[in-house]
Image: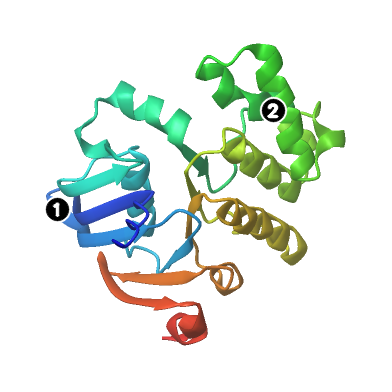
Amino acid sequence: MPAAPATAPAVEAVDLVRRHRQGDTVVAALRGVSLTVAPGELVAVVGPSGSGKSTLLHLLAGVDLPDAGSVVVAGVAVHLLSEDARAALRRRAIGLVFQGCNLVPLLTALENVALPLLLDGTPRSQAQARARAALAAVGLAARAQHLPDRLSGGEAQRAAVARALVAAPPLVLADEPTGSLDAASADGVLALLRGAAAGGAAVLLVTHDPRAAAYADRIVRLADGLVVAATGEAGACAALAS
């Protein structure tokens, strides 16, 4: 009997190169980075400031384009898409958790979480029902009608996670989601991302926080725009200390 085919990656990046111009100087933010994340896997990308972590996340999300290399999400070559097509792919296949939450200040928590569904054409009643369920899942059912400035930092970040997960995307990308949170709030957010991976999503977490990286199945370390180390869960502490 032939072996069952391997599960296709949720995201695959190959030989990514990204350069930024600073005055007359060209700086290589990424210098040939390759990375694959499978469905159900939580991967932490760590490294010092300026190592290329956020640049990598932006390329995987199609927010920015590489100067060389390729990005494939859910079987779609992101780097070949138009800007509008990349935005549509993000709505349907990628959940983004931004550093600082990026909630729309004039919308309630419920409206913020429902927004990606509404933008993708989901009827309002269905979008709001799914948003309420997502807020309940993160413990914010009672805060659904509050504007972002009435939420604590931990509540706002949980709302941002609910917004990222409401469409059950196959890929979740989180940029420093615990950076400004206390330990209890950070653990709550990380448990939600861990739960998304347990439900079958591929989750990539960019972080400086060793506590956050400890939730990962695999840790990838960047330095100077290159992958310099990768390890499984058993080697996490050594990778973070190196």
Residue 26: image tag: 1
Quarter of the image that includes the N terminus: bottom left
Q: Is residue 105 visible?
A: no
Q: Which residue is mark 2?
A: 130
Q: Residue at x 44, y 36 (%)?
A: 93
Q: Amino acid at mark 2?
A: Arg
Q: Is residue 44 visible?
A: yes
Q: 12 above or below 79?
A: below
Q: Which is nearer the eye, 164 or 67? A: 164
Labelled pair 2, 1 in contact (Cβ < 8 Å):
no
| Nearer to us: label 2 or label 1 | 2
Element at label 2: helix
Q: Residues within 10 Å of mark 2 (few under 14, many from 20)?
A: some
C-alpha gap between disc 2 and disc 1: 45 Å
List x then y, in percent, for residue 82.
24, 25
Q: 96 above or below 89?
A: below
List x then y, in percent, for residue 170.
47, 43
Q: 198 above or below 129?
A: below
Q: Residue at x 57, y 32 (%)?
A: 167
The residue at the far front in this view is 1
Element at label 1: strand
Q: Amino acid at mark 1?
A: Val
The residue at the far right in this view is 142
